[in-house]
């Protein structure tokens, strides 16, 4: 899989129809596909999008903040606790939650999703345009990406989604505070970061900070966070990783 060119897929938000159309030029056996998270919520096919990302050959799906919210809702589903209300306020669809509750295999897969991925060319891939996941590093592990992913997995297995929600909701940190972006790249050993999470309005992935950051959330899904830009150009969310 590492020998294949990399295809990045930004936030889908349950819009399978637009996702399938955007992926037509990119056969699964010719591309290494990386989904940036936020496959669920807003649109009607969130669980379907999760299953598709899981089953597409040569693919990796990262954890987005909406997946974290959905797992919090699953935890609180029986007594309709605060996790359910937070998730529904973010566009969660009740039928998706019920479908996920019936699919223990998909639940297990979702809890094993990494928060970030370091590619062979030094590109760091993560969902959010923020460095706040760095606050989860609790040990002296010299590999911060490995340390963060390990702690994320531990929290998800324990059902403790609150720390992840707090660290995965900030927007625009890298754009507003370039020094934090530069420090994050130094800390992780990356040369650039690819992310979704904050919708842009361009017809191609948005490159900024002199190429140190690339935003792949072009608002492709027609549904999503209330008040966010949605229904943008699919080519702003689904595209090959630039050299």
Image (cartoon, rainbow, N blue to C red):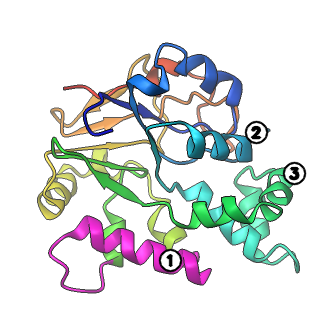
Residue at 44% x, 26% y is: 29
Contact between marks 3 and 1 (CB within 8 A): the answer is: no
Residue 178 vertical placement versus 100 (above, below)? above
Whichever of labels 3 and 2 marks the residue nearer the N terminus, that label is 2
Contact between marks 3 and 2 (CB within 8 A): the answer is: no
Horizontal and vertical percent position of residue 71: 67, 67
Which residues are drawn in magenta? Answer: 137-162
Residue 47 versus residue 30: which sits nearer the camera? 30
Mark 3 vs mark 1: in front:
3
Q: Is residue 61 left or right of residue 146?
A: right
Residue 211: in magenta span = no
Residue at 66% x, 40% y is: 49
Horizontal and vertical percent position of residue 224: 67, 41
Residue at 81% x, 78% y is: 81
Q: Residue furthest top?
A: 25
Q: Is residue 234 left or right of residue 179?
A: right
Residues packed near mark 3 inside 10 Å, few (<14), some (14 to 19) or many (20 plus): few
Residues packed near mark 2 inside 10 Å, few (<14), some (14 to 19) or many (20 plus): many
Residue bearing the label numbered 1: 163
Numbered disc 2: secondary structure: loop
Numbered disc 3: secondary structure: helix
How far apart are the alpha carbons under marks 3 and 1? Answer: 26 Å
How far apart are the alpha carbons under marks 2 and 1? Answer: 27 Å
Quadrant location, the C terminus: top left
Q: To which quarter of the image does residue 130 belong? A: bottom left
Contact between marks 2 and 1 (CB within 8 A): the answer is: no
Whichever of labels 2 and 1 marks the residue nearer the N terminus, that label is 2
Residue bearing the label numbered 3: 95
Quadrant location, the N terminus: top left
Q: Is residue 103 left or right of residue 122?
A: right
Secondary structure mostly taken by the magenta-highlighted segment of the chain: helix
Tag on residue 45?
2
């Amino acid at each position: 899989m590492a020998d294949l060119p990399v295809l990045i897929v930004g936030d889908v938000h349950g819009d399978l129809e637009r996702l399938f159309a955007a992926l037509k030029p990119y056969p699964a056996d010719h591309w290494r596909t990386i989904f940036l998270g936020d496959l669920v919520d807003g649109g009607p096919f969130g669980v379907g999008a999760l299953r598709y990302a899981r089953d597409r050959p040569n693919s990796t799906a990262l954890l987005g903040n909406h997946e974290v919210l959905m797992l919090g809702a699953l935890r609180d589903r029986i007594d309709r606790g605060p996790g359910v209300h937070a998730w529904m306020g973010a566009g969660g669809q009740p039928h998706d939650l019920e479908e996920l509750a019936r699919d223990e295999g998909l639940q297990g897969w979702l809890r094993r999703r990494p928060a970030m991925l370091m590619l062979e060319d030094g590109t760091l891939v993560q969902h959010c345009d923020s460095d706040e996941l760095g606050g989860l590093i609790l040990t002296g592990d010299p590999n911060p990406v490995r340390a963060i992913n390990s702690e994320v997995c531990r929290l998800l297995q324990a059902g403790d989604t609150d720390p992840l929600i707090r660290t995965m909701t900030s927007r625009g940190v890298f754009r507003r505070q370039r020094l934090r972006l530069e420090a994050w790249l130094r800390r992780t050993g990356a040369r650039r970061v690819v992310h979704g999470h904050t919708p842009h309005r361009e017809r191609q992935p948005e490159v900024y900070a002199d190429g140190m950051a690339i935003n792949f959330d072009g608002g492709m899904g027609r549904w999503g966070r209330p008040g966010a830009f949605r229904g943008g150009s699919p080519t702003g969310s689904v595209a090959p990783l630039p050299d």
